[in-house]
Structures are given as structure tokens and as C-alpha cells.
């Protein structure tokens, strides 16, 4: 019996044709895949190009929006510059409030409000509202000499009670001195153990 395919019976010419057809088929398959990949990439590039063209068409409005947002950011920064001024900027402000609160308790008065103002070259202003009897508020004013750092009373307003037995109020605006670097160093060195 003869085998179905005898390589010796096939002429070499047909073998080369078969190899050529196989190479051609592989080449066509590769070319098709490359062509498909390139067409997908081309479609993506066209979409990106259209998006860029859209941005270029709206360039003026984008620039105007950018300028508007930039001015809004500058305005917000300007508004926020003074926001941190009420936070303790002097290292002795908290100690001052503690001493003032203790003095108020000692004279039977109470501090109802404490508003630090912005720091200036002359010092930091604070506004204090005190409630108590007239004699207790007088003792509080007298006791301000003992508070450290020494403060200067810039403004003082006393409101009498409406009826007998009610408390009056005292509104004070005081200035705390600005600490000098040498005084601050000496104070911090003195507090070290």
C-alpha cells in the first residue's frame, strides 16, 4: 500500500508554492492585525484632535474663566490675611488671660467675653467684658497692676446695673506689650528647669 502522501512523488516546485502560500497567509494575517490596530489608534487620535480643537474654539472663554478664578483666589487670600490675627500671636497672651480670670474670681467678678485684636508694633489689643458688682469691678481695675505682662488700659466703659442687686458690666480695651526677642529669650530661659 502506498501512503496517501508521498513526499518523493510531490515535485519540489509544489512544495515551494505551498511554503510561499503559507508565508503569504501569515503576512496577510499580520498586515490585517497591524491595519486594525492602526485604524483604532487613528480613531483615538481623531477624537483627541477634535477635543483639542474644541478647546481651541473656546480658548477665549477658558482664558476669561482662568482670569476670573485667579482674581477670586487673590480676593479670598486678601480676605483671609487677617483671619489668623485673633489666634494667640504673643506667647504671654494665654498666661495673661489665665491671670485675668483668676483676678476676676478673686474679686467676685466674671469675664464674659475676651476678644484679642490684631497685633501691632505697639502691642496687641484685647477687649474684655466683665460682669459683677461695682465694688468688685473697682477691685478688678485695681488688681490689674499685679497682672503680668503689665497692660495698658486704653478704654474703659462702665455700665451700671438696671436694678438694685443686679450686676453691672465693665468693657475694657487693653494693650499688651509686644515681646522683644531678648525678653522672650530671657523669659523662656527662666522657665526651663
Image: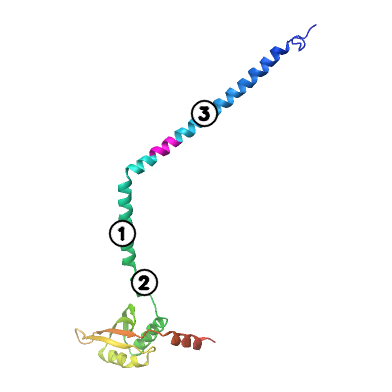
Give the answer, above or below, for where 135 lies relative to 43. below
Q: Which residues are magenta?
A: 45-50
* Between discs 1 and 3, the one toward the N terminus: 3
Q: Distance of mark 1 from mark 3, alpha carbons? A: 49 Å
Q: Position of residue 29 (x, y in %)?
A: 58, 24
Secondary structure at badge 1 equals: helix
Q: Which label was assigned to residue 84?
A: 2
Q: Which label was assigned to residue 35?
A: none
Q: Position of residue 11 (x, y in %)?
A: 73, 10
Residue at the location (31% across, 59% down)?
72
* Between discs 2 and 1, the one toward the N terminus: 1
Helix, strand or loop: magenta stretch: helix
Q: Which label was assigned to residue 36?
A: 3
Q: Which is more toward the observer, 113 or 89? A: 89
Give the answer, above or below, for where 145 lies relative to 92. below
Secondary structure at badge 2 equals: helix
Say whether marks 2 and 3 touch (CB < 8 Å): no
Secondary structure at badge 3 equals: helix
Residue under label 1, please give it.
Answer: 71
Taking the magenta stretch, the answer to whether it contains residue 52 is no
Mark 1 Cα-neighbour bin, 10 Å: few <14, some 14–19, many ≥20? few
Amino acid at each position: 500500500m502506498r501512503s496517501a502522501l508521498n513526499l518523493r512523488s510531490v515535485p519540489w516546485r509544489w512544495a515551494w508554492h505551498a511554503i510561499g502560500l503559507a508565508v503569504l497567509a501569515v503576512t496577510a494575517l499580520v498586515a490585517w492585525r497591524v491595519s486594525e490596530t492602526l485604524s483604532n489608534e487613528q480613531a483615538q487620535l481623531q477624537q483627541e484632535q477634535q477635543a483639542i480643537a474644541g478647546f481651541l474654539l473656546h480658548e477665549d472663554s477658558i482664558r476669561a474663566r482662568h482670569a476670573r478664578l485667579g482674581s477670586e483666589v487673590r480676593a479670598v487670600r486678601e480676605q483671609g490675611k487677617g483671619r489668623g490675627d485673633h489666634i494667640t500671636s504673643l506667647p504671654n497672651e494665654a498666661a495673661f488671660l489665665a491671670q485675668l480670670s483668676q483676678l476676676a474670681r478673686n474679686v467676685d467678678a466674671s469675664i464674659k467675653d475676651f476678644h484679642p485684636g490684631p497685633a501691632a508694633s505697639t502691642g496687641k489689643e484685647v477687649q474684655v467684658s466683665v460682669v459683677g458688682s461695682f465694688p468688685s469691678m473697682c477691685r478688678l481695675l485695681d488688681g490689674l497692676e499685679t497682672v503680668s505682662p503689665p497692660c495698658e488700659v486704653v478704654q474703659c466703659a462702665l455700665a451700671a446695673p438696671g436694678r438694685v442687686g443686679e450686676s453691672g458690666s465693665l468693657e475694657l480695651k487693653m494693650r499688651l506689650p509686644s515681646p522683644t526677642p531678648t525678653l522672650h529669650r530671657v523669659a523662656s530661659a527662666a522657665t526651663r528647669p
